[in-house]
Every structure is written in C-alpha cells, then in structure tokens.
Image (cartoon, helix red, strand yellow):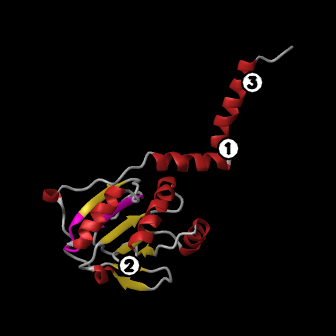
Amino acid sequence: MAVKKKTVLNIVVILFILSFFVTPLGHYGKLFLNRIFSFSPYVVAEANRKKITDYDWRLKDADWNFFNFQKSQGRVILVNFWASWRLPSEAELSSIQKLYDTYKDKMDFYIITNEDRPPVEEFIAKQGYTFPVTYLIIGDKSAVKIPEKPPYSYLIDKDGYIVVEQDGIANWNTATVKKIVDDLLAE
C-alpha cells in the first residue's frame, strides 16, 4: 500500500508542530516570535509624565555590594525589570544589550532582577551579555513601581520624568528609541 504525498506532508507538519513543544527548537522558535512581534516601547505623553521625587533606593550590584540609585539623579536612566526564567524577558534582553552597547557611557542602565546570583550569572554568561546586572532588595522602598511580573521598563529623563513606561516586551534597539534617547541626552 502506497502512502499518499498528502499524508506524508501532514505527518511532517504535525511533527514540526510537536517539535515546538518537546524540543529546544520550540524554545528558540518562541524567542524568535517574541522578538518579531516586539515593537518600540510606548512613550508617555508629556502632560501625563510622572516624576520621580525620591531617588533613595537601595540596590545590589553584580558583586552583591549595596549601592544607591541616587547616584543616577540628573542622568538619563533605563530601568528594566527582568527574570531569566521568563521567555519575554529573555527575548527582550538582546535589544537592551544593543542599546547598552550604543549608550553605556552616556546614560545609566539598571537591569534589575530579584533572583539569586548563581542562575543569573549562568544565564548572563550563556547569553554573552555585558550590561550591568542589578539585584532588587525585596521589601525596600523603590523609586519606581515594582512590577508583579517582568519584563517591565522605564526610561527616565534627567529631570526625573518617566518618558517611557513599558509593561511587557519591547524592542529597545530601534531608530525611534535611539531618537528619544538622543533627544533626552541633548537636553
């Protein structure tokens, strides 16, 4: 009994779809789709921008040393909350790395997680990221709202106004974002 071409094609399509659920191909496919469907972040209208009034926010750096967010007062700042186990965070971080590569000496980056160091260090090394990782001190006061689930980001101008507040994944490596950052740095 000969197998019809249509039957073979159907089996191949079913196996391909199943591979997204039971193989690493699925993980990479989901990352790819998240990146394709991420766009420039939402810019808050000037009249609706909230201002940070208290920069007194304790955090930990990659070496687990305490420092204060106050050191960034008067600078352009990107704050991104992320988690290594959240696929949207993983998809977004590659665009943040590219933004960091362009602006690392001109603005401050706070790529914040509330995870323990070992899994974060392993994730960062595996991905080859060089941006500074910051650790949240759970229970301490903060300068911005801490999201329930990452990714969640803020772009803050030199005067402390929140120019971008992004709930969910965004592409931070776009001409639109770079224009916004360039304008904020020129102020």
Residue that protrudes farthest toward the left in the picture: 47
Q: Is residue 129 left or right of residue 134?
A: right
Residue on which the image places disc 1: 22
Q: Is residue 145 visible?
A: no
Q: What residue type is labelled 2?
A: Asp
Q: Which is nearer the eye, 151 or 180?
A: 180
Q: Residue at x 33, y 59 (%)?
A: 177
Label 3 secondary element: helix
Q: Earlier in the sequence, mark 1 or mark 3?
A: 3
Using the numbered discs, state the Cα–Cα distance from disc 1 to disc 2 in whole angstroms: 42 Å
Q: Nearer the viewer, mark 1 or mark 2?
A: 2
Q: In this view, does 77 lie to the left or right of 16?
A: left
Q: Residue at x 38, y 84 (%)?
A: 67
Q: What residue type is labelled 1?
A: Val
Using the numbered discs, state the Cα–Cα distance from disc 1 to disc 3 in whole angstroms: 21 Å
The verdict on residue 152 being magenta is: yes
Q: Which of marks 1 and 2 is nearer the N terminus?
A: 1
Give the image location of residue 78, x and y in percent: 34, 68
Q: Tell me if label 1 and label 3 are in contact, CB under 8 Å.
A: no
Residue on which the image places disc 2: 105
Using the numbered discs, state the Cα–Cα distance from disc 2 to disc 3 in whole angstroms: 56 Å
Quadrant of the image occupied by residue 53: bottom left
The verdict on residue 135 being magenta is: no
Residue on which the image places disc 3: 8
- Find the magenta span and give its range: 151-162
Q: Which amino acid does label 3 sit on?
A: Val
Give the image location of residue 27, x and y in percent: 60, 49
